Amino acid sequence: MSRVKLRSMLFVPADSERKLAKALGNPADVLILDLEDAVAESRKETARQMAAEFIAAQAASISARLFVRINPLDTALAMGDLAAVTVPGLAGIMLPKTRSAADIARLSHGLDALEARAGIAPGTVKVVPVATETPQAMLNMQTMCSPIERLAGVTWGAEDLSTAIGAVSNREEDGSLSPLYQLANSLCLCAAAAAGVPAVDTLYADFRDAAGLAAACRASRRRGFRGRIAIHPDQVATINEAYSPTEAEIAHARRIVDAFAAQPEAGTLSIDGVMVDKPHLTQALETLRFNE
Ligand code: COA
Ligand code: MG
């Protein structure tokens, strides 16, 4: 399976001419043209057409991969969205309010037909579900990790889940995430790892707070997230930097790989007086693969 780099995924409301234009020069790995929550009901049809036109016009000439967040599968809009935007150049679909793997399978079957109609090679269009926005998804999380060919990553969100639960807030009085949303964060990590795809962290809403974003990204990367959603163009450089391996990490990874290559019989080695074994080698290879 060819991997799509999901280090930074910038949301762009698809009905905004200005934002689409602004997104063109952005260093995000992925632009997510949004048809869902950032678009008013009266603008849904316009957004769909603008997304399709943007993909057709820009996909070949910009470095970012183009995804579309369609409306949820239990709305009347979803399949029309999918039909409109499955044009050559579409790299992926973000599926909001996913309920279980059955939703992902249904989306994938829709894409099977639409790719054929559009003359796109089968399986080209990847899928990234938002895996924690519904209570059903939280209870069905083990089904999300069945690795389907189109699955490119998994992300999570705390806002829609708290709405569905009927919570006053998803945060405690001290500002920390409430337990249910900490669980959502952790389940996203597990579901992604079980499926063998990257976990992409949720958005950082305060887009003027670059230092807060950088700190949140560092913490998130330590926990295993490989990238993050951005909602504002200014967040992307911070995210790209935070989720990329540092020079020191790359140098250390190379030493581990070289040390095992030099001693193919060895299961465990010492580097600078510290034991390294198979998991360290796996991690080192992953670090070196990051920039491919
Ligand atoms: N993508 C592309 N361009 C964006 C952008 C985005 N997500 N957010 C802002 N911009 C553009 C603005 O249009 C503006 O450019 P312009 O002067 O050429 O018009 C420039 O960046 C600076 O924007 P700024 O004034 O700082 O922000 P704003 O007040 O216009 O917008 C938000 C703030 C939050 C409304 C906006 O960032 C946004 O729409 N974010 C995405 C929301 C979204 O998609 N949500 C769904 C997922 S949760
Ligand atoms: Mg939402």
Image (spheres, rainbow, N blue to C red):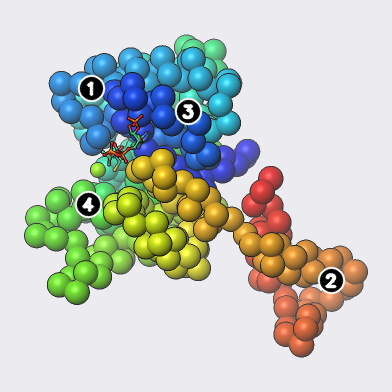
In the figure, 154 relative to 39: above or below?
below
Judge from the rendering whether residue 86 lies leftward or rightward of residue 281; answer left or right: left
Residue type, label 2: Ala
The answer to which quarter of the image holds residue 211 is: bottom left
Do the numbered discs 1 and 3 sit on residues whose CB atoms are within 8 Å?
no
User: Which residue corresponds to the image point at 48% horizontal and 53% vertical from the top-left?
Assistant: 238
Q: Nearer the viewer, residue 133 or 32?
A: 32
Q: Which numbered disc, 3 or 4, marks the residue that appears first in the sequence? A: 3
What residue is disc 1 on?
44
Q: Verify CB contact (< 8 Å) between mark 4 and mark 2.
A: no
Q: Hey, what amino acid is under mark 1?
A: Lys
| Cα distance in 3D space between marks 3 and 4 | 28 Å
Q: Residue furthest bottom?
A: 273
Q: Residues within 10 Å of mark 4 (few under 14, many from 20)?
A: some
Position of 276 relative to 155 (above/below): below
Please tell me which residue is depicted at 90% across the width and 69% down the height of the picture.
262
Label 2: which secondary element: helix
SS class, disc 4: helix
Judging by the rendered image, the residue that carries numbered circle 3 is 24
Identify which amino acid the numbered label 3 is placed on.
Leu
Q: Earlier in the sequence, mark 1 or mark 4?
A: 1
Q: Which residue is mark 4?
A: 159
The numbered mark, 1 or 3, whose residue comes first in the sequence reads 3
x, y (%) of residue 169?
Answer: 14, 60
Q: Does mark 3 have its CB less than 8 Å from ligand 1?
A: no
Is the Cβ of the residue at disc 3 closer than 8 Å to that at disc 4? no
In the drawing, what numbered circle is on residue 259? Answer: 2
Q: Is residue 184 above or below residue 110?
A: below
Label 3, label 2: how many angstroms apart (C-alpha)? 43 Å
Quarter holding residue 73: top left
